[in-house]
Each structure stands twice: as C-alpha cells, then as structure tokens.
Image (cartoon, helix red, strand yellow):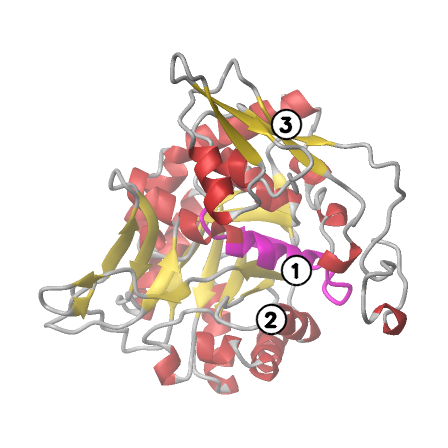
C-alpha cells in the first residue's frame, strides 16, 4: 500500500494534507478536531502583535453555480482576533498532545526587524515545527503595511525573510500573494532571503456579487462593503499555474512548495503535487464540508498511487513539471481532430451551436427529411482541434480529440518560417 508520509523542508508529516492558515485553524479546539479526523498538519491562523486585530460582521460571501454550489468563496476576515499569549499557550499544548502532527505558525508583523526578532523565540518555544510568513493577505492588513503590501515588493520579501532566518532555527516558509504580475519575482526574493520553502497561493482580490436593491456588494457591513480574498475551487487553475511557474523557473527550481488554492479532493492534491508541491494546504473545502473530507483525500490518493505504482508521494512530486513549457516551444505540427461517438451522442446539438456560432464551423448538422432526426458529424478538413465541442458536450467521452499523423517533424514557433520575427529569436529545443 502506498506510503502517504512526507518530509517537507525537513519537517516530517504522516500525510501531505495540511489545513491552511484560516478560520479552521484559529484555536486549539478546531486543530484537535482536525487531527482527530486525520489531517497531517495545520498552519495555525496568523498571529500578530498585541492588541489583536478586530474583525467586522459580516465577513463571508460566495460565488455560486446553478445549483447553489459554492464555486468561489470570499472573505474579509483579518488575522487572529485572540491574544498572542493565548494562541502561544494553545499551540504549546496541542503540539505536546499531538507530537506526530505538524504545526506551522503563521506570522504577520510590520516591517520592523525588532518585532520579528521578539516574536520568533516565543514561537520557537512552543515546539512548533516551522513558521509561515503571511505576505499574501489582500484586505485589511495591507492598509497597515503588512500582508500583500509586503508580498508585492520583492525587496521587502527578501528583507523580512532574512530577518527571520537570522532569528530562528525553525524552517521558514514564505506565503506568496497572487495579486502580482509575476509570482516568480517574490519567489526568487524569498529564496534569496534564505527561505526554506514557499507556499501559494494566498487569496485573490475579489468582489463576488452585489445586492442590486441596496446597491452594495457582499458581504455587507452596515450598508457598505469592500474587496476581499477569493478562494475555493474557482481559483485552482490560477494556483496551479503559479505553482508550476515557480517549480520550472531555473532560479527557484528545487525550492520546496506547499500548494494552496481550491484543493477539495485527492485528485486536486495529486495535480498540485505533480506540478511541484511537496505538500498541500486546504481551507475552503474544509469550511464547506467539515474536517472529515480528509478521509476521502487520503483514501483516494493512496488508491491512485497504488494503481500507478507510486510507493511514496516523493516519487511523483514535480512529475509534470518537465512537460510544462512556454507556448513558443509547443509543437506547431501537432494536430488533433474531434471525433463524435454516434452511439453515445444524445443529439442535443450543443457542439454544433458552439462551433457554428463561435468557433470554426466544422460540425455539420444533418437532418433526416423523413424523420426529422438530427445527426452531427465533424468536417475534418475544417476542424482545428480547439476542443470547444468536447468541452460543451454534456456526455463525457462522447467527443474525443484524436491525434493525426501529419508526417511532419517537431517544429516550435522559434523555428517556424511563418514567424515574422523568427530571425530575431534564438532557435531552441523544447525543454
């Protein structure tokens, strides 16, 4: 049976599933319940200087699907609203009671070295396994010169990371903000500052929806609102891309990554791990469905690993990174064409409408004059293999994209004679 235990920047964990720094990890009661459910670790909700932050009411909103499924989750909650002393006391006791579980302490302070130097020994004394520097919070704290206000400035990231490395023996994980043009810049800065790892993504600036009667966005606080941090399954594609960018960047390659963003099941976790994450952090899914979701995550990942022959998580960390490249290195001579399985087709016509109205008019609608029966066939000469028909088809597997033998060798855009600036681009083979 697959071994789910991991070692992440020197920290041993019974499995790769950790709870992210958020409301589910804001007190001992929650963390103990999480450990009882089977989570391998937690990142304790962000601690700061006293007096503790003061939160508003209400704090959450959501972006819903058709059946009121929560696709995205928005919050305007700040860091812990409990005293530093109480949090440290609880961390100490929980770590003593659960020595085989990982406790990472998230921290957020102003950019003053003295403040970091003062708090780090206190955290270290709890027996915690590491610290996570919260450089990602996008609301409330940036106005005070913390959170994303630090994470968006690589020089600050490097500076504070170095302060922490000089004042603690604990592994230092830097949590990155996605509210930036190129996430590689702060990741490189974190590494330059001596970070043992990075974690990402933190939440994304967002407004989910409005009350059109009151003309105010949700969540509503006394007739007003503000942007908050967006998370949940909707942010997963953004998070995967940012994780991959860091994993394949020559300047940060090999830097341990804790993947965060829309992870709700074992498959999500496997995808983050395959793109370079040594462990994963979960928040929204636990808030919506409870701590017991980790049971399915562990069971599903273990079964999949057994099926694929992976004996440990480490065997497939970053396995997909070599297959992730820049657009200019993709094979211009590769071709796929859509194929419709007539036995599975329910004749809904969604593929035809999508292709006819918005794509390449490469699906023919054939109507039997006698019965009025409709049949849909792909015009292979016109099909460009864009995948739109496959995506819009409600029957999984009915439409497949079939690779074609073009008889042409690999050729990327830097080598393509149709490239108007090809002579100015260095000819390189795909990585």
Residue 318 relative to residue 211: left or right: right
Q: CA distance from mark 1 to mark 3?
A: 25 Å
Confirm or deny contact between disc 2 and disc 1 (CB under 8 A). Answer: yes
Q: Residues within 10 Å of mark 1 (few under 14, many from 20)?
A: many
Taking 178 as reference, is 337 above or below it? Answer: above
Secondary structure state at the residue bearing disc 1: helix
The stretch in magenta equals: 238-262
Q: Residue at x 17, y 69 (%)?
A: 216
Q: Residue furthest front?
A: 369
**Would you identify the image quadrant in which residue 110 lies?**
bottom left
Q: Position of residue 101 (x, y in %)?
A: 49, 43
Residue 310 appears in view: yes
Q: Secondary structure at mark 2?
A: loop
247 falls in the magenta region: yes
Location of residue 252 with respect to 24 vertically, above or below: below
Residue 257 appears at what percent x and percent y?
Answer: 62, 55
Which one is earlier in the sequence, the residue at label 2 or at label 3? Answer: 2
Image vertical order of residue 77 relative to residue 341, above or below? below
Q: Which residue is identified by label 1?
A: 245
Q: Earlier in the sequence, mark 2 or mark 1?
A: 2
Q: In the rendered structure, find residue 305 and report the number of the disc placed on it.
A: 3
Residue linked to disc 2: 182
Residue 79 appears anywhere in the view? no
């Amino acid at each position: 049976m697959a071994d789910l235990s991991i070692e992440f920047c020197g920290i041993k964990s019974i499995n790769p599933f950790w709870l992210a720094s958020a409301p589910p990890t804001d007190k001992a009661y929650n963390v103990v319940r999480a450990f009882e459910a089977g989570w391998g670790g937690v990142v304790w909700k962000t601690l700061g200087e006293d007096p503790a932050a003061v939160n508003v009411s209400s704090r959450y909103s959501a972006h819903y699907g058709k059946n009121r499924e929560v696709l995205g989750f928005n919050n305007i909650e700040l860091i812990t609203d409990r005293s530093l002393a109480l949090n440290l006391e609880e961390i100490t006791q929980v770590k003593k009671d659960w020595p085989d579980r990982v406790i990472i302490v998230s921290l957020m302070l102003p950019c003053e070295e003295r403040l970091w130097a003062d708090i780090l020994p206190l955290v270290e004394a709890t027996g915690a396994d590491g610290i996570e520097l919260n450089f990602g919070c996008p609301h409330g704290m940036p106005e005070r010169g913390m959170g994303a206000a630090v994470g968006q400035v690589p020089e600050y990231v490097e500076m504070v990371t170095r302060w922490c490395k000089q004042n603690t023996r604990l592994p230092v994980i830097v949590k990155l903000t996605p509210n930036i043009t190129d996430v590689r810049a702060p990741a490189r800065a974190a590494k330059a500052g001596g970070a043992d790892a990075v974690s990402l993504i933190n939440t994304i600036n967002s407004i989910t929806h409005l009350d059109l009667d009151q003309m105010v966005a949700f969540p509503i606080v006394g007739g007003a609102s503000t942007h908050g941090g967006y998370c949940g399954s909707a942010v997963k594609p953004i998070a995967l891309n940012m994780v991959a960018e860091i994993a394949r960047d020559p300047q940060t390659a090999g830097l341990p990554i804790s993947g965060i963003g829309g992870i709700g099941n074992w498959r999500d976790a496997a995808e983050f791990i395959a793109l370079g994450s040594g462990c994963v952090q979960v928040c929204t899914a636990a808030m919506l469905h409870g701590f017991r979701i980790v049971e399915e995550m562990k069971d599903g990942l273990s079964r999949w690993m057994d099926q694929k022959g992976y004996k440990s998580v480490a065997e497939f960390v970053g396995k997909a990174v070599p297959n992730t490249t820049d657009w200019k290195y993709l094979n211009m001579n590769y071709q796929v064409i859509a194929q419709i399985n007539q036995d599975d087709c329910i004749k809904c016509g969604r593929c035809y409408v999508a292709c006819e109205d918005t794509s390449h008019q490469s699906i023919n609608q054939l109507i039997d004059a006698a019965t009025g029966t409709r049949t849909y066939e792909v015009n292979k000469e016109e099909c460009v293999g864009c995948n739109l028909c496959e995506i819009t088809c409600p029957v999984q597997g009915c439409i497949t994209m079939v690779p074609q033998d073009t008889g042409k060798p690999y050729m990327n855009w830097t080598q393509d004679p149709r490239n108007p600036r090809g002579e100015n681009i260095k000819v390189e083979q795909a990585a």
